[in-house]
Amino acid sequence: MEYARKAYYFLLDAVQTLLVAAAIFLVIYVFLFRPFQVDGDSMYPNFLNGEYVLTNLVALRINNPKLGDVIVFKAPPEPDKDYIKRVIGVAGDTIQLKGGDVYLNGKLLDESSFLSPSVRTYGGAFLKEGEVITVPPGEYFVMGDNRMYSSDSREWGFVPQANLIGDSSLVYWPLNDMKIVTNPL
């Protein structure tokens, strides 16, 4: 009988521990941080296909994204998919693509801190070469770092604030590529 009582209390403690751990995990997952897997090469060479990024869900509720931030959002062309891209323009900014370069508010955007100088940026279906657009309030213009292979705002337009999920904080997998995600601008 003593053995059964010890086994009962052990199981009760184990179940309580698992429930507390599950509750903590759920709170963190729903309100604070969420993992995101990079799918594709649109952010190469800064983010690689298959890497896991920890996305901070609180940061974008407190502050709006800034130029250069890497964000995760519901993709406007496919709302059931999450995309990861870099913020190139915020509300009120003008953007122009000319001669393979990005102009922000009439000035050449210096992207040398995160892109090779050989990277060229050309227009798409939404933002055509030489055209100037203004980012409306509550929306963002985003692009992938691998400009030749990125489906981004040049093709499908602005990302509404309501589509934002979070700010990329940490690449945590694979372990040998672990790094904190910083804004290079």
Image: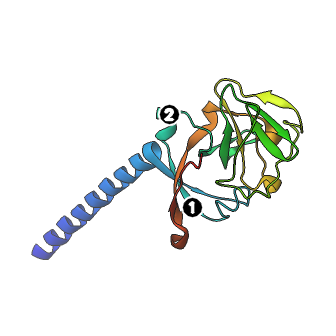
Q: Nearer the viewer, mark 2 or mark 1?
A: 2
Who comes first in sequence, dot 2 or dot 1?
1
Outermost residue on the left side: it is: 2
Tag 2: amino acid: Asn
Element assignment for label 2: loop
Question: What percent of the width, then of the height, locates residue 140?
Answer: 67, 34
Question: What percent of the width, then of the height, locates residue 59?
Answer: 48, 40
Instruction: Classify the position of the C terminus by image quarter.
Output: top right
**Which picture quadrant has residue 75?**
top right
Pointer 2 local density, CA inside 10 Å: few below 14, some 14–19, many at least 20 = few
The colour scheme applied to this rendered structure is rainbow
Question: What percent of the width, then of the height, locates residue 12?
Answer: 23, 62
Identify the residue under disc 1: 52
From where the camera sits, is residue 47 visible?
yes
Instruction: Classify the position of the N terminus by image quarter.
Output: bottom left
Q: CA distance from mark 2 to mark 1?
A: 23 Å
Judge by depth and name the residue closer to the eye, 83 or 16: 83
Identify the residue under disc 2: 63
**Which picture quadrant has residue 143?**
top right
Residue 90 relative to residue 122: left or right = left
Residue 108 relative to residue 57: left or right = right
